[in-house]
Amino acid sequence: MMWDAISSILSFFPVIGLAALGGFTSQKSGVWNIAIEGIMTYGAFAGVFAYHYFGNSIGIALLFGFLSSLIFGVLLSLLCVHQGLDQIVVGFGLWFLSEGLAGFLYLAVLPSVTVTETLDPKILSLDPLFYVTIASFTILYVILKHTKQGLAIRSVGENPRAADTVGINVYRTRWICTTVGAGLMGLAGSYLALVILQGFTYNLVAGYGWAAFALVLFGRWTVPGTLLSSLVFTLLIGLQTRLQVAGILVVPSEFMVVTPHIAVVVALALAGALGKKSGMPAALGRFYQKE
Amino acid sequence: MKSPSAENGRTILEMRNISKRFPGVIANDRVSFTLRAGEIHCILGENGAGKTTLMNILFGLYAKDGGDILVDGRRASIESPRDALALGIGMIHQASTLIPGLSVLENIVLGSEPSRGPFLEKRRSEKEVHQLMNLFSLEVNLRARVEELSMGERQKVEVLRALYRGTRILIMDEPTSVLTPQEKEALMKTLKEMTARGDISSIVFITHKLPDVIAVSDRVTILRKGKVVDVLDTNDSTMRQLAHKMVGRDVVFEVERGVTEAGETLLEVKNLHVLNDDETPALDGVSLSVRRGEILGIAGVSGNGQKELVEAIVGLQRATAGRIHLKGKDITQWSPGKRRALGIGYIPEDGLAEGLLPDLSIVENLVLGVHSQPPFTHSWVLPFDKGWFIHQCSVNEYARRLVAEYEVDTPDIDLPAGRLSGGNIQRLILARELSRSPDLLVADKPTSGLDVGSQERVRRRLMKEREAGKAIMLVSEDLDEIIMMSDRIAVMYEGMIVGVVPTKGVSKETLGVMMAGGAS
């Protein structure tokens, strides 16, 4: 009974965790991706779309959500990593593009779909993607800390010129991180639609993308920090919902809608208050131009 | 490791007729350069003479427009730093290319990490670097993050990194600019020993500092405006001779100091405290005073509180305790604008970043700060308009006069200020600050990064102000400058003033010891 409650709260974790991890991966290499919210919306659409048209398999739908979201990472890399356009401006554009695309295609090609399948096997009544998320955090941690590629990622995020002079391919490293990051954001959206909400509605991401963005900052650009902040956020959101449903916590239901927004503000304020030595990659947001 | 002496003197690197054009300038005009085994070879020249460009070509960072590079007598095609590294050419850049957030070890092995499959072998790399450190008697804490190290230690890490990659020709771009005299001496000693032992075949040492050339090099190639002026044996040359060749005219090293009577105390700082961003003390109880007609030199290694002291005085940093009095008024809580109005002029350390708005025109930069006072404003149509509009004619006239008076070399006063060279930028800031004739001038490293010709002009200007009875606070890391200019010298160390000494009779060594925290 107790575990059921906890596991149902934790089942929301991949939404937050994967999105935050996507933002983290991109930022660690020095590229802001502020389109998390939009890419998640697109990923949600793509997942439900693939579920409907490609044989009602959640596995394939999730995979499609991940893969087709990579395109936004590719776009971001082309424009910002290679062409040097402003990452915030382009990110803004991508946010609108991805969200608009999802909304348009939803109206144009997608009938009302209800997802009836579930993903198996469940371990401790938790979805496999929960474990995939935890594994992704672990793998990324090991990569960053113990591999050549990880060292390359950290150095292009800190000082791309230095990395370049020792023969690290700055563009390729950033390109890969940004693209994989976008894929993870899309996957988070697909999971939200397919597993949590069992269908697509417009605006279903409802601020969780921005929350994920803030959680990377709050996690101080470290893997454990991001993991921890995502977990705590998931638990708080889940707890609030449970208590409300159980009637223990009496707040107007309108309040539910703004919870992620409030959490973002609180997380950012706390991150700011904790001090200025934040661990932010020194070259984050800066275009690297070869001479 | 090769045996030393055997092959010393042989030419190991030759650059023939190297040319490089940038839009609007010829950075290198058929420059030839030869490097012999076993030598430390200085490339001397003013800022913009093409020294760094030449070496960036050698290191594969720039593509050359013409000419050949021969390594060991064979033609080499160097298209990227990778090619250069493969030939045993390593470069230590002026702006450190270490990555502050990574550990010392990670920085040293970055790019050629020992690894098994994709995984780093930390223990093996640690062992290798330790061996290297023992061999060259260089000691650094490998586990520390680079941002925790002093500039001298970072320089060591750079050298170690080059050695780790098997560098035999090491290019160092202005390596001494951030070091204390002691660190500088230690570095030069290390370099000499390394070439003498043959650990490294040869070192190319880029500099615009003449004492460095004399102290460290065997030969020197002098560049001026992209061309080779001369190649000399250092032993046969004097500073004066080198300076003449570098600048193209005689340079006066000593600025004449007139006799002035130190007047009333103008600035009085008492027990000043300022905190860093992370709440640690940046200034820990600083007291000093500056009088009319005197220059107070502030010596110290960069980062010991000079910047905070300067910024607290001009009002850019908040004092957490202590008092600042100017002309007898307590200005501790005043805004920078109010302090300026009372008579403070400020020449910031990095003129381009802090003293100017690079995208605005020279005119706009010059008039900034006085633009809201007559005669630069005029009332226009509206009855309630109290001089909201800037009077363009008088502003232009004013700017033209200042540009001429302060010898700012520009074709057009409407040019964005950021397009000027370093020396001109500094003169522009001097023009703006001095034209308001402030009683106290706070100059933070006003000549750093300038060539000797521009330095001389700035110094003469400051000296003139002193003679006119102004009080001047001069922060500098250049001890020669401090000794040449100051009437008294205050030495800062870790946010405190370790001592104030009269310039007369003080030696560089004494100051060096004080800068390292020793008592006077």
Image (spheres, grey):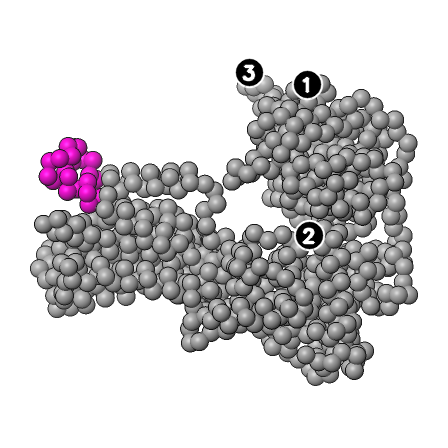
Neighbours of disc 1 within 10 Å: few (<14), some (14-19), many (20+): few
Q: Position of residue B143 (x, y in %)?
A: 53, 59
Could you tell me which secondary element the residue under label 2 belongs to? loop
Residue A73 marker: none
> What's the amino acid at mark 3?
Pro
Q: Farthest residue toward the top? A: B383
Q: Is residue B86 magenta?
A: no
The residue labelled by disc 1 is B329
Q: Is residue B349 above or below residue A11?
A: above
The residue labelled by disc 2 is B178
Chain of the residue that carries numbered disc 3 in the rendered image: B
What's the magenta region? A237-257
Frontmost of labels 1 and 3 is: 1
Q: Is residue B144 above or below residue A252?
A: below
The residue labelled by disc 3 is B383
Q: Position of residue B266 (x, y in %)?
A: 75, 24
Q: Residue at x 22, y 44 (%)?
A: A237
Q: Residue at x 76, y 57 (%)?
A: B185
Q: Does the CB distance between marks 1 and 3 fall below 8 Å?
A: no
Q: Position of residue A39 (x, y in %)?
A: 29, 55
